[in-house]
Amino acid sequence: MSETSTKENMQFQTEVNQLLHLMIHSLYSNKEIFLRELVSNASDACDKLRFEALSNDALYEDDSELRIEIESDEKANTVTIRDNGIGMTRDDVINHIGTIAKSGTKEFLQKLSGDQAKDSQMIGQFGVGFYSSFIVADKVTLTTRKAGTDKAVRWESTGESGFTIEDVEKAPRGTEIVLHLKDDEKEFASDYRLKSIIKTYSDHISIPIKMHKRDDKGELTDEWEVVNKAEALWTKPKTKISDEEYKEFYKHISHDWQDPLTWIHNRVEGNLEYTSLLYLPSKAPFDLWEPEQKNGIKLYVQRIFIMDDTENLMPRYLRFVRGLIDSNDLPLNVSREILQSNKIIDTIRRASVKKVLGLLEKMAKDDKDKYQEFWKEFGRVLKEGPGEDFSNREKIAKLLRFTSTHADSETQNVSLEDYVSRMKEGQDKIYYITAESYAAAKNSPHLEIFKKKDVEVLLLHDRVDEWLVNSLTEFDGKQLQSVAKGDLDLGDLDTKEDKKAQKKIEKSAKSVVKHIKKVLGDKVEDVRVSHRLTNSASCIVLNEHDMALYMQQLMKQAGHEMPSTKPVLEINPTHPLLEKMKNETDDDRFADWTSILFDQAILAEGGQLEDPSGFVNRLNALMLS
Ligand code: ADP
């Protein structure tokens, strides 16, 4: 590698450029968040050094008192933020702040709403915090030296035309950022202003934040004073922590800008000793549905930050939980590998899952509106639970909410317990239908007999539902049964008279069924008289274990091989269309009627026709005849 000490000009990556342009020209509200972001980075850098120094004490270089210093200079119109944390190498600087846009950058640009207040608050969550410097500064100078190395670098940029990078002779360990404030941002070059911002946003940061003391006359001195509380919030007794403090702390660790929905703070003593502080966000983060999340649970060992963890401390179906776990029993040199198979972690995880489920249970009982808010954001994630966590299946099942034929709205607020409490005399199953949308579920012909008998059916229309019902096959000793799959067995819901009437209809429809079957040939598994239909002419019935038609199609579109299973066509002989068919003497026309009957049933199921224009032509021909 060639060593260079001259200034090098480099360009920002395209998306970074866009982002900077935005920071410079269009974020006018909440400008003070730049300080929160930079202090947050400085605090992370100190945490990282403390962690690395556990196995390499020399990194402290005789300066183990980690701190953040903030200075303002009214004359020069600058603000300086300095930390003696881990620092960065030249490559780190180029990679982290300049050329490589992190995954969050693009997302951030896409998510911009145009609402100033909201957009500026989002900055932290998307991991683009450093760039917020350019909201108030027209030039930023960053000087840094990585712990354990003796080469320092200086990065400088006006945000508009790339950046320069050069080696510098000597610099203290860690990172110093000088913000050269824009002319109209002079207000930030004031100790008072900065102190009040720190109080609002960074009071709980456990690293001390220091500023120059003033003497009796109000003049700045060389002495430093700590301006934040600088204690680990979670180590304090619950009664000594205000809601405001909990909320502020949540924003710090989650990078969220909104208040959390609720939280649970818990100290465990005995065999294992640990503290957990777990939050439920009020809104889903942007990456909730991405395979890998950026944030998760922070692991501390004896108050020392060890790592962010998104896999071992919470299961996937609770991946929206934020917060921290501070253990007294894990070794300080715990690694990711150790986390993956560790008895202590397993125990903590199991207990934490119980805590979160308990918190949800309580919310569902005591504050239904709040629970609905939660459900709207995270219900679809929780629905992954029964398939993932066998031991808590029943507990999770109680937390699930659905729409049903009982309620006349798309809001998912029917619990399985509600359903069971409304079950009819003689009903022994929990009936449901899965469909592509609420409308498709609600209007499905499969529901006709249930409407007639006034039996409630759960309307499942989230994609994850098809997967949910695969793993949640019963609740409270009652089987979950799809009304669109397999033989319909209504058990004691069918009276003797019902059965008698069915037999009679079946008999009278024998020949038309036979004729239809002949026409459809190997397109169907079977054709039979339906006991589900009262209004519609026909419907498609799948095998007990088949995936719903719309899901099969989705899977095929996504490139998955799907076994081609043949459906059963059920017909309603009391429908006028079938009356007409019974009297049809022209074979070709009978075939057309049959095709239409079959295609209609597929359409009602949310399926796609193999030959849509054939369907339209046949329909038109019959309408005109
Ligand atoms: P984020 O902090 O969310 O990753 P930023 O844009 O604020 O996003 O920072 C980008 C990266 O630059 C950080 O992840 C970190 O690696 C590095 N960085 C920023 N500030 C500092 C600092 N004060 N000390 C050491 N590294 C830093």
Image: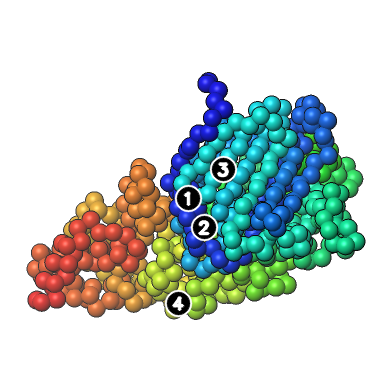
Drawn side of residue 482 relative to residue 366, left or right: left
Q: Look at 65% across and 48% down and name the residue there.
A: 178
Q: Residues within 10 Å of mark 2 (few under 14, many from 20)?
A: many
Q: The disc labelled 2 sits on which kind of residue? A: Ile
Nearest-to-viewer mark from 2 and 3: 3
Nearest-to-viewer mark from 4 and 1: 1
Q: Do the residues labelled 2 and 1 touch (CB within 8 Å)?
A: yes
Of the residues under marks 2 and 3, which one precedes in the sequence?
2
Q: Name the residue under label 3.
A: 156
Q: Name the residue under label 4.
A: 451
Please determine whether, in this image, residue 165 is positioned above or below residue 280.
Answer: above
Q: The disc labelled 1 sits on which kind of residue? A: Glu
Q: Which mark is residue 24?
A: 2
Q: Residues within 10 Å of mark 4 (few under 14, many from 20)?
A: some
Q: Do the residues labelled 2 and 3 touch (CB within 8 Å)?
A: no
Asked whether the viewer can see residue 347, the reply is: no
Q: Distance between the residues labelled 4 and 1?
A: 65 Å
Q: Position of residue 49 (x, y in %)?
A: 74, 36
Q: Quadrant of ligand 1?
A: top right
Q: Which mark is residue 160?
A: 1
Q: Distance between the residues labelled 3 and 1?
A: 11 Å
